[in-house]
Image (spheres, helix red, strand yellow):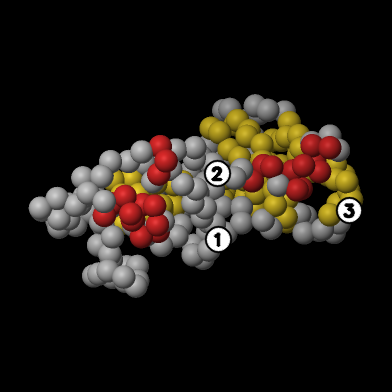
Amino acid sequence: MVLVEPGSDGAPFPSADFFDYVIVEGSTDGGQTWNPVADGYDSRDKEEWLAAYNSAINEEQNSTAVGTQALFLPRAMNLRDNGYFLAGDVVRLRFRLFADPAAHGWGWAIDNLRIQDNTVTSLASELKKTGGLNVYPNPSEGRFTVQARFAKPTAGLQIIVRNTLGQVVLRQLLAGAQTELKQALDLSALSAGMYMVSVGVEGDAAVRKVLITK
């Protein structure tokens, strides 16, 4: 639910007439830089929020309306809509509320947050049905074997390894259409720690965590 000062009717985001707002931002470099998942929004986003905000305006023009369970309403965002995030990215999210020095309201509350996990895509489901994706031995000093079996010949496969910050440290393209995969993966040049190994095609990959010990 969002009970923050609404901007002027028709005011675009961002603009001087778009006053208080809430925004979800994402980072692919461990929090060094942040980009919007979607435009910021305010109480105008839902009729119920705007009505609640305007139902209790005091003499300082602040809203004293308080959030209630009935004001929790669903709102969906697509990470790809703003063009900052690509399929396969590991994205760290943050939730930010901006309030200017003028009127203010009750604030922002989030409940039942659901983020789609890229490990439950169609390719991952196929891998589960056919024996799954296996990366072994795990842990290892850096030399692994990636093994998978696909329901049908699958072209355009790639193996991507990311560190815990989501940064790609290795990308390996696989030629031809694969039905069974058994690929050596040498990560011995990397530092000890946890890494994520994904196998799939653009926008559809299964992921396994591996531990490098030195």
Distance from the alpha carbon under mark 3 to that under mark 1: 28 Å
Q: Residues within 10 Å of mark 3 (few under 14, many from 20)?
A: few
Residue 167 seen by the camera? no
Q: Residues within 10 Å of mark 1 (few under 14, many from 20)?
A: few
Residue 5 higher or lower than 8, as above or below: above
Foreground mark, 3 or 2?
Answer: 2
Q: Which percent across, then down, holds residue 213? A: 58, 27
- Element type where label 2 sits in the image: loop
Residue displayed at 22% across by 54% down:
99
Residue 115: which numbered mark, if any? Answer: 2
The image quarter containing residue 115 is top right
User: Looking at the picture, which amino acid does disc 3 mark?
Assistant: Pro
Q: Which percent across, then down, holds residue 195? A: 58, 38
User: Looking at the picture, which amino acid does disc 1 mark?
Assistant: Arg
Q: Are marks 3 and 1 in contact (CB under 8 Å)?
A: no
Q: Earlier in the sequence, mark 2 or mark 1?
A: 1
Q: Earlier in the sequence, mark 3 or mark 2?
A: 2
Badge count: 3
Q: Which percent across, then down, holds residue 106? A: 26, 44
The image quarter containing residue 139 is top right
102 or 196: nearer the viewer:
102
Image quarter where the C terminus lies is top right
Residue displayed at 84% across by 37% down:
129
Foreground mark, 3 or 1?
Answer: 1
Residue 205 seen by the camera? yes
146 or 83: nearer the viewer:
83
96 or 43: nearer the viewer:
43
Residue that mark 1 sits on: 80
Residue that mark 3 sits on: 153
Q: Are marks 2 and 1 in contact (CB under 8 Å)?
A: no
- Element type where label 1 sits in the image: loop
